[in-house]
Amino acid sequence: MAKIDMGKFAAFCKDMGFIYQSSEIYGGINGFWDYGPLGVELKKNIKDAWWQDMVRNPPPGPDGQEIRMVGLDCSIIMNPKVWVASGHVGGFADPMVDCLKCRARLRADKVWFGGYYPQPAQIVDQQMPPFVLAVESDNKADAEALLNDLYAKAVKRKKLPADLQRAVTFSAAEVADRKWQLPCSDPKGAGCDGVFTEPRAFNLMNETHTGPIKSEENKAYLRPETAQGIFVNYRNVLDSSRLKLPFGIAQIGKAFRNEINPRNFIFRSREFEQMEIEFFCHPKESRKWYEYWRDLRKRWYSTLGIQSDNLRPREQGEDELAHYSVGTTDIEFMFPFSDEPQELEGVAHRGDFDLKAHAKHSGVGEKFMYFDEDRWNGDSANRTTNSFKEWIKSNPPQEEIEKYLFTPHVVEPSAGADRFTLAVLCEAYTVEEVPDAKGKLESRTVMRFHPRLAPVKCAVFPLVNKDGMPEKAMTLYRELKKRFNVVYDDKGAIGRRYRRQDEAGTPFCVTIDGDTLQDDTVTIRDRDTLKQKRVPISEVRCEIEKALES
RNA sequence: GCGGGAGUAGCUCAACGGUAGAGCACUUGCCUUCCAAGCAAGAUGUUGCGGGUUCAAAUCCCGUCUCCCGCUCCA
């Protein structure tokens, strides 16, 4: 994709009413954006397309079976315990130390330092060891194991000599007692000679308080992801819907993260909207479903007009995986602001991390286990009893039990609605040369949206404002707008009106002319080819519908 | 978070210490039978925000906010 100047592109989006900076008249606010009249239609169409294609009418599963999918709409503020269970509070609300040089960030209460010396180790107390590595761990024993790994890695990368010996291990408090500046060592690669900052509280979650009195007891968080709302309602959905595994729960909603550095227009913002599915299945089948969703989600973007050249699925390496994941594919898009593809959606295999975490923290325990009654009944011929309880007493192998009773595994396709909106805007944006009335080449800006996503589906024009053309055009406009987002425009020359619609990405322009008054036919002008065809006025609706289904 | 750049009418820009302006767009009217036409009239500003220097600041200085670019970061 050709590079687009994001400043100019943001100006274009503002000019057209796609996207504005939030609270602009007060100088704006970093990381927040508003959608204008065209933008809100575009984004709504994107969300509607996702809901239609994923929730109401998903394609058949890997074995040709119907996909079971239901929707959900959870509150943004939840019991703060949700975020303790999910791991967000631990990782994102505790004091952290940062290295200003290599940007490493570790939890202040969990950081351990290993002191390394050339052999034989000459330890001088109160004097900082010549080589230091830092790791994060709950206890000293684990820390030392991690230090061993890190040292091996550092040696492999030739950041440290191979013949050093770790002679001491300090906690952060012990280092502070010795009045050393907490040394950094680049926990990822080793070799950084920076120092850590004083412990600072980082809160990547937005905090708020519920109730009129602001106090520590009623502190709450704006959700940093929609996923947890699905997990905590997992049992409710199962109990109220007669669903059986495998099935999915989908949600579209806002999430909030205090990004350190919001950047690249609406790509990384502090308030954003996610379109997420949590798909629950038997652990043995999770690989199959992971692949199904990974492939389906990539295909979905293509059907909405994203060129596959600009789309990359990228399987994450083990060291990049989030704390809960055993496999993740990022579906990435070549945004014009970067040479590197950037994440549109993550399809993650989250295993049973979330359900187990909530089962444990909430105390619901085994209620999050799933009993596959169909399978149990189906296998009755191989057993002497039909009672699962009885059968369990016979001490069957664990693997046999888990065929019927297990904590479901989860595959999570999590898409960014704003990111995809930006991708659609970038992909659609085209400036081209077209001949004007006199045959001279002029530049034309056109948003080549897929008709399904286009904010406006059709514009209706009277060719001139006389002879009853405006009335005829208005009648057609009123008829079409019952079904589509349509605009009426009688201002300025016809060419100008076409161009205005090109910039808004309107796929069709219908013009009422002299012939219409005679024989009830109109011209339909195609945004991309500029070609016109004449059709009976009664067929306009049909033409638009055909394009929407393409 | 660090470094660099930018911010004047809706947009693109000019004014570079001395009356804030042009083109486009916009509004109204006329004229217009298919790709940014023409004519006439009209409206448009806390020069991002706050302070300082000066007789006088869009202009010089300091601070701040926002955006862009490069590093960095991104559960």
Image (cartoon, rainbow, N blue to C red):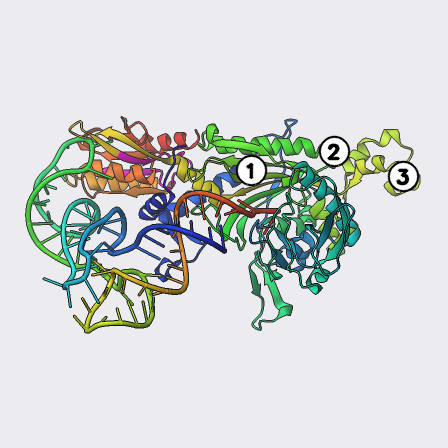
Q: In this view, does A470 lie to the left or right of A542?
A: left
Looking at the rendered structure, whether the residues under marks 3 and 1 are on a common chain is answered as: yes
Q: Is residue A346 left or right of residue A27?
A: right
Between tags 1 and 2, which lies in front? 2
Quickly name the residue at label 1: A54
The range drawn in magenta is: A444-462
Q: Give left or right: position of A43 versus A72.
A: left
For the C terminus of chain A, the quadrant is top left
Q: Is residue A356 left or right of residue A395?
A: left
* Disc 2: CA contacts within 10 A as few (<14), some (14-19) or many (>=20): few
Please check the rendered image and state whether residue A449 is part of the magenta-colored stretch, yes or no.
Answer: yes
Residues behind callouts 3 and 2 on a single chain: yes
Amino acid of disc 2 = Lys
Report the residue at 48% width, 39% height from top.
A49
C-alpha span from label 3 to label 2: 22 Å
- Amino acid under label 1? Met
Residue furthest right as drawn: A394
The image position of residue A372, as x and y in percent, is 77, 38
Q: Are marks 3 and 2 in contact (CB under 8 Å)?
A: no
Look at mark 2 in the image and give the residue it sits on: A284
Whether residue A197 is situated above or below residue B54 in the rendered picture:
above
Q: Nearer the viewer, residue A219 or A471?
A: A219
Between A390 and A409, the one lying in front of the other is: A409
Foreground of the two, A159 or A445: A159
- Per the model, the C-alpha gap separating discs 3 and 1 is 39 Å
Give whichever of discs 3 and 1 has the lower sequence position: 1
Quadrant position of residue A207 = bottom right
Chain under disc 3: A
Determine crowd level at label 3: few under 14, some 14-19, many 20+ residues with C-alpha closer than 10 A.
some
Three-letter code for the amino acid on which mark 3 is drawn = Trp
